Image (cartoon, rainbow, N blue to C red):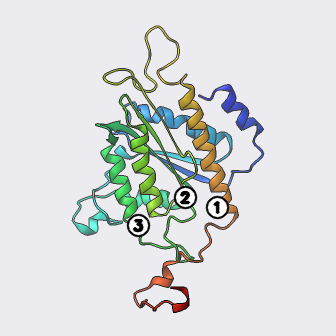
Amino acid sequence: MLDKTQEDLCDQNTTDFSDLNALILNCSLKPNPQGSHTDKLLGVVEAIMLRNKVSVERVRVADHDVAPGVYPDMTEHGAAKDDWPELWKKVDAADILILGTPIWLGEKSSICQRVIERLYAHSGQTNDKGQYIFYGKVGGCIVTGNEDGIKHVAMGVLYSLQHVGYTIPPQADAGWIGEAGPGASYGDEVEGSDIPAGMDNDFTRRNTTFATWNMMHFARMLKDTGGIPAHGNSKDLWNEGHRFDAPNPEYR
């Protein structure tokens, strides 16, 4: 699963990540036990984290009945069933959230968009500092497909995560695409080669490695400093009774 450089980096690491918790949500359109190309690339992320003693759980969202909507529990708003409240417990407990998605018609999967909308359902909740609930947590994404659009998809996913409060490290995305049009997807067997499609792609392996380590490093820093300082970003200052105070003329 890991190449020599990735193995060496894990062997040489001196940072303790053992108290970190990562949740990987695979937003493939395929439920288990169908194979998922996105799952194969996410496996590299998981392998690096596990080698560094991060607690990791990988969930195939298609295996769950996540109702559409922007409320924490859609059964309170007309849905017959909603598995999101159970998934939310995992999201809430995670220091790191990684969204994995295939590309369809140049966009993230519909399941990935639904997850983002359900994350948004909690965007008004706050932590014990009065900050929005995702402050102090780290987000990233992994993208696969056989058409152009890795950066476009990552742009939308990472914007959404930071907008609700996740901290996005530098280079927190990675992906792989094959040739445009029908063809092999990540991890498929390639005729005449012993190496599955994409697994020997240096650009993808490097960026996946960078993204994973950056997410771990930022989660470590945030946990060690008690999260993001609350000065100037606490919702408690902007409660319902807040009124506009005219600025001091000296500072106009």
Left or right: where 220 falls relative to 197: right
Q: Which amino acid does label 3 sit on?
A: His
Q: What residue type is labelled 2?
A: Thr
Name the residue: 64% across, 26% down. 3
Q: Is residue 178 above or below residue 49?
A: above
- Please say if the residues under marks 2 and 1 sit with CB atoms less than 8 Å apart: yes
Q: What residue type is labelled 1?
A: Leu
Callout 1 crowding tier (Cα within 10 Å): few <14, some 14–19, many ≥20:
some
Q: Which of marks 1 and 3 is nearer the N terminus?
A: 3
Mark drawn on residue 167: 2
Residue holding disc 3: 122
Which element is circle 3 on? loop
Callout 2 crowding tier (Cα within 10 Å): few <14, some 14–19, many ≥20:
many
Which element is circle 2 on? loop
- Please say if the residues under marks 3 and 2 sit with CB atoms less than 8 Å apart: no
Residue holding disc 1: 222
- Please say if the residues under marks 1 and 3 sit with CB atoms less than 8 Å apart: no
Question: Measured from the top left, where is residue 210 in percent x and y?
Answer: 61, 40
Left or right: where 16 falls relative to 50: right
